[in-house]
Image (tube, helix red, strand yellow):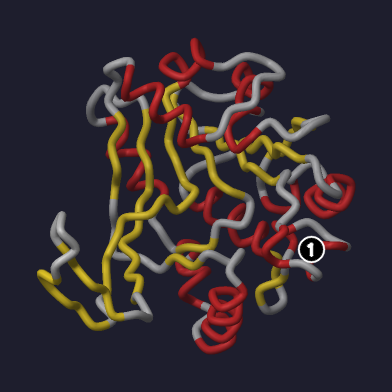
């Protein structure tokens, strides 16, 4: 079955203010294209033909830009959050429109992650949820002091760097697995939903790829993305080639 996709496009993008005061974060431009258009193109290249957009903040601008999706070769429907429901709450309103296994993506997702490969891997074995994860390094700008229970120095590390796996805001979910945990009007964040599945004994798998991923909610990442797009446009559009 061709997977359908739900794009979470209702956030206010507070970290990018004042840019997002007058237009929604998914419409933030990258070069001459909004980030949302790049994501729609990637989904189409991954075999998606139907997309549901969950909208709230300045939703009329997203509707005006995407319309019915035909200009992207897609069929687009909309779910309106009258009030913020968290990063997974609006799933309850879109569930009946989605496929047995469906894609969920943040509306500001900026990556060249192979979505079709992720869906195929998800379907190889019974899996309630797949999470696209990225290894990110964080340098500590201070010397870290290690002590024992008596506050005696046991070690000293000067400005260490730690690596962590972080969620990219891209998921493949099994509808039957998540449905019992959703209810209209219930506030629910995606980490909560995934933890509920784990606690219920369901398989939740983290999937990595050698890819590019930038969190454009961070001004420094957004600046990097603009530079990369200008220099290597194909990095973001290679899925169409």
At mark 1, the secondary structure is helix
Residue drawn at x 49%, y 84% as measured from the top left: 232
> Closer to the camera, 226 or 218?
218
11 vs 183: above or below: below
Among all residues in the image, which is located at the extreme bottom?
Answer: 231
- Quadrant holding the N terminus: top left
44 vs 101: above or below: below
> Closer to the camera, 84 or 92?
84
Among all residues in the image, which is located at the extreme top?
Answer: 180
Q: How many marks?
A: 1
Q: Position of residue 181 (x, y in %)?
A: 50, 15
Task: Say left or right for 117 vs 22.
Answer: left
Among all residues in the image, which is located at the extreme front?
Answer: 150
Task: Say left or right for 157 vs 191.
Answer: left
221 vs 202: above or below: below
Q: Position of residue 171 (x, y in %)?
A: 44, 40
> Closer to the camera, 77 or 152?
152
| Label 1 neighbour load within 10 Å: few <14, some 14-19, many 20+ | some
Q: Position of residue 98 (x, y in %)?
A: 57, 24
Residue drawn at x 74%, y 61% as measured from the top left: 27
Kindly indicate the quadrant of the structure image that contains residue 210. Answer: bottom left
127 vs 223: above or below: above
Residue drawn at x 62%, y 57% as measured from the top left: 108
Task: Say left or right for 146 vs 100.
Answer: left
For disc 1, the marked residue is 20
Q: Position of residue 237 (x, y in %)?
A: 52, 68
Kindly indicate the quadrant of the structure image that contains residue 142. Answer: bottom left
Residue drawn at x 66%, y 48% as measured from the top left: 73
């Amino acid at each position: 079955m061709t997977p359908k996709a739900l794009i979470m496009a209702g956030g206010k993008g507070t970290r990018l203010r004042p840019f997002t005061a007058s237009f929604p974060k998914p419409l933030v431009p990258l070069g001459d294209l909004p980030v949302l258009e790049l994501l729609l193109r990637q989904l189409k290249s991954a075999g998606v033909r139907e997309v549901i957009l969950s909208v709230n903040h300045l939703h009329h601008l997203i509707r005006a830009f995407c319309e019915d999706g035909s200009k992207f070769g897609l069929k687009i429907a909309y779910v309106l959050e009258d009030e913020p429901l968290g990063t997974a709450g609006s799933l309850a309103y879109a569930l009946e429109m989605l496929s047995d296994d469906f894609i969920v993506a943040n509306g500001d997702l900026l990556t060249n992650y192979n979505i079709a490969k992720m869906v195929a891997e998800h379907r190889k074995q019974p899996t309630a949820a797949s999470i696209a994860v990225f290894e990110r390094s964080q340098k500590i700008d201070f010397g870290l002091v290690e002590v024992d229970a008596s506050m005696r120095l046991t070690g000293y590390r000067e400005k260490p760097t730690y690596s962590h796996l972080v969620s990219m805001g891209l998921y493949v979910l099994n509808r039957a697995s998540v449905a019992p945990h959703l209810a209209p009007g219930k506030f629910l964040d995606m980490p909560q939903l995934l933890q509920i599945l784990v606690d219920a004994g369901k398989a939740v798998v983290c999937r990595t790829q050698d890819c590019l991923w930038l969190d454009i909610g961070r001004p420094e990442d957004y600046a990097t993305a603009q530079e990369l797009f200008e220099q290597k446009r194909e990095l973001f559009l290679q899925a169409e080639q």
